[in-house]
Image (cartoon, rainbow, N blue to C red):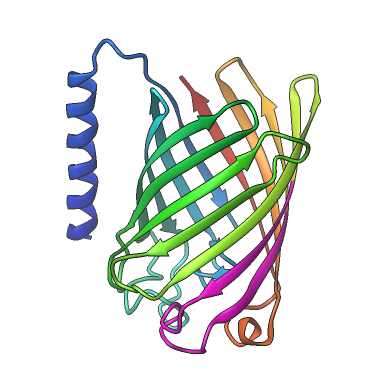
Amino acid sequence: MLKKAFAVLVFALVLGSVSVAFAEIKVEGDVYAGVFDKYLWRGYDLSGSTPVAQGGIDLIAHNVTLSYWGNVQLKGDPDNGNWGETGYEGGNLSEAEIGIDYALPLGELVTLNIGNLYYPTDGEEDTNELYLSGTFNTLLQPKLTVYHDWDDNKDARFYTLEVGHAFEFGMVTLNAGALASYAEGADYWDGAVETNEPWNAELSLSADIAVTEQISITPSFVYSSPLSDDARLIIDTEMASGLTVTLNF
């Protein structure tokens, strides 16, 4: 917990320094919080099918986004966990994510994003992932992303291809998406299998319900299923649902 508190403090100091140095730059963003029946990450149930609360903040200025996100266990389950002896204690911050992202539009058709995600976790080694993604501003908004762990698991890479579409119905926006992934690196899942195969597929559905011009409520649902025999040794078919409240500013 001290490690996470330090990470949050460093992030707050960075944000404070940025806000002072760029006082004249317009900053936009959002802050959000939600509850979910489990923490599902890349097809992996990281909360032992116990409920979690998640929240974060995004600050955006001149195509640069600084973000913080955290996952809190709402129900203890120390005998069925992935984060060590304390990871599933009720009220425990099991994982955080500190990110920086730069968006580079290439004309009207393609947008590149490059960034880094720092993961301070409880009971596991902290690590960093560098990522590069390309989004095509066409029908279904196809997006290809490559993640590379350059810190704790240097052989690990993760690839995703996703598509999605939004349907607007007055104050409600319905979002539908699909994703397929590929995992590379023998140590990606603690060396459990030689993971160099398709990993998981996801179908997602959510609805952004505008309460005011700045506040929205979003119920969401995700279905995930493994795509290879190696993946089936580690992950199962999973479903996760939740509800998020977002304040845009």
Q: Residue at x 50, y 23 (%)?
A: 248
Looking at this rendering, what residue extends furthest in the top direction?
A: 24
> For the magenta stretch, what is the residue range?
177-203
The front one of 144 and 171 is: 144
**In which quadrant of the rendered view does residue 168 lie?**
top right
Q: Is 247 drawn above or below residue 158 in the view shown?
A: above
Q: Nearer the viewer, residue 47 or 119?
A: 119
Which percent across, then down, holds residue 137?
A: 68, 34
Q: Is residue 198 magenta?
A: yes
Q: Position of residue 110 (x, y in %)?
A: 60, 35
The question of residue 196 being in magenta is answered with yes
Q: Is residue 49 visible?
A: no
Residue at horizontal 41%, vertical 34%? Answer: 58
Instruction: Identify the image quadrant of residue 191.
Output: bottom left
* Of 40 and 76, the residue lying toward us: 40
Q: Residue at x 69, y 28 (%)?
A: 209
Query: Which quarter of the rendering shows the N terminus?
Result: bottom left
Residue 154 placement (x, y as % from top left): 34, 73
Position above or below: 204 against 75: above
Left or right: 176 in relation to 157? right
Say if residue 3 shows up in the picture. yes
Q: Is residue 13 above or below residue 125?
A: above
Q: Is residue 39 left or right of residue 208?
A: left
Image point 64% across, 21% down: which residue?
211
